[in-house]
Structure formats: C-alpha cells, structure tokens
Image (cartoon, rainbow, N blue to C red):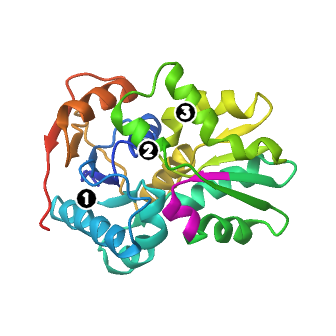
Amino acid sequence: MNAPIGVIDSGVGGLTVAKAIMELLPNETIYYIGDTARCPYGPRSKQEVRNFTWQMAKVLEKMNVKMLVIACNTATAVALESLQKHMPFPVLGVINAGARAAIKKTRKNEIVVLATEGTIKSGAYELAVKSLSTKAAIIPLACPTFVPLVESGEYEGQFSYDLVAKGLKPLEEVRFDTVILGCTHYPILQKQIEAAVGPHIHVLSSAEETAKDVEAILSYKGQLRTEIEPPQHILHASGSVPIFRSIAERWLEQDKLDIRKISFEQ
C-alpha cells in the first residue's frame, strides 16, 4: 500500500493527470516517466507507440509501483488492453474517463474530441462514448501542432493563442456544446482553447475523472498509502531535463522537484 503510483506519458502532458492525482490523493507517491525524447506519439505507428509504452511500463514495474496510469491518449488507445492483461498491478487509461466526463456534461449530445492523429485514427473515443450513450455524436479533430507547442515550453503569450485558434478553425461551422481534451498535453492549453471555442462551450480534461478512478481502485483494494511522512515524488524525462523541469515546476506549482534523466534500450 505504501508503494508509488506509476504515471507514464509521451512527454509533459501526463503531468496534468499527475497533478490531479496529487491534489485528490496528497498522501500518495508518484513515479512519473515522460518520454520527451520520442514525443510526439501521435504521428507514430501503433507498433512504435506500443513498444515505447511497454518500455516505460517495464521500468516502473521494476520500481515496484502498485498501479500504472497511462496518462497518454495515444498510448491508451493502442497499449491499455495488453498491459492490463500482463502487468501484475491495475493499469488505467484516460480515454474512458474523458468520455465519461463529457457524457455527464453535454446537453446537446454533440461532442468534439481534440486529440493527436493516432488517437483520432484509433476511433477509441467514439467507442468509449458509444458504450456510455447511444445519443451522443462525436466530432473528431486532430491537432498536430498542439503537443510540440506544449513540449517547447512556449505555450504562453499571443503566439500560442493564434496557433490554437488556427488549429481549431475547422470547428467554426460545427455545432457542439462540449469539447474533450483528448490528449493530456491539451489542458496546458485550456485557456487558449476556451478562448477559441467561446465561453458557452464545456472544455473538459480527463485528469480529474482519472484521479477519481485511481482513488476508487486503491480504496477497493485497501492500498491507499498509510505512511505519515510526506510523499517523495520522482519524475523522469528521456529528453531535456531543464526544459522538462521548467514546465513541471510551472504546472505542478512546485520547485525543487526530483527530476531524473532516463533512457531506454532501442
């Protein structure tokens, strides 16, 4: 029960999920891996994404995590099922949580999914939404410029607003009342996305719903952390540690984070 929770992502985007878990379960320890050297995953083949996701999962298995959260929609779409079958601990993705949040909020049953090319091609959100509602219609839109923008750390200022507005231009003629941020990088651009779609549209992240799933599973299994000492989170990046540190400290609103370089066998 005092083991850490593992969180993996293609880069810094999964920090949005890690933050939600930290806020809901402040006593839990997080071990995070961001594969920033090989990000973005969206344009990659399914086999590449599956291989990379398994590499990160195996590293965290050796670190004795008690649960794994795939905080990457692209990786969830291609690797969740196989990891759930073969890992010795619970494995969660973020797609079902995002779909559930949207179904709770929509009134018109017209839902836009913003995601990477890989997630859109997988049709994973259509399947997840249809499993929850036969009425809801999904409008998918790939936003390939968003992840590089976030990973660069240059996501504040007018340039980011302009880039996001350009990426969302295809939605100008579409009717919808709810947007799923179908990539965990996108909540870092939430202000820009809300400005582009307008004030009456619900813009939803899967992070909070995923954190609730983590709490429910750990509680059911009797594995909530009981140690009194504050948790010591450890974050890993396969690419530039200084860039990762800058984004992590801003997003998590913490300094002196324990951030370590990690590499994978090719």
Viewer-side residue, 2 vs 146: 146
Q: Determine the CA span between mark 3 and mark 2.
A: 12 Å
Name the residue carrying label 3. Answer: 163
Q: Secondary structure at mark 2?
A: helix
Q: Residue at x 82, y 45 (%)?
A: 173
Gap between marks 1 and 2 measured at Cα: 27 Å
Image quarter hosting the C terminus? bottom left
- Quick check: marks 1 and 2 in contact, CB under 8 Å? no
Give the residue at mark 2: 147
Q: Residue furthest top?
A: 157
Q: Categorize mark 3 by other alpha carbons within 10 Å: few (<14), some (14-19), many (20+).
A: some
The residue nearer to you, when weighing 164 against 63, is 164
Foreground disc of the pair 1, 2: 2
- Sequence-first disc among 1 and 2: 1
Q: Nearer the viewer, mark 3 or mark 1?
A: 3
Residue type, label 2: Val
Mark 2 burial class by Cα count in 10 Å: few <14, some 14-19, many 20+: many
The stretch in magenta equals 113-121
Q: Which labelled disc corresponds to residue 65?
A: 1
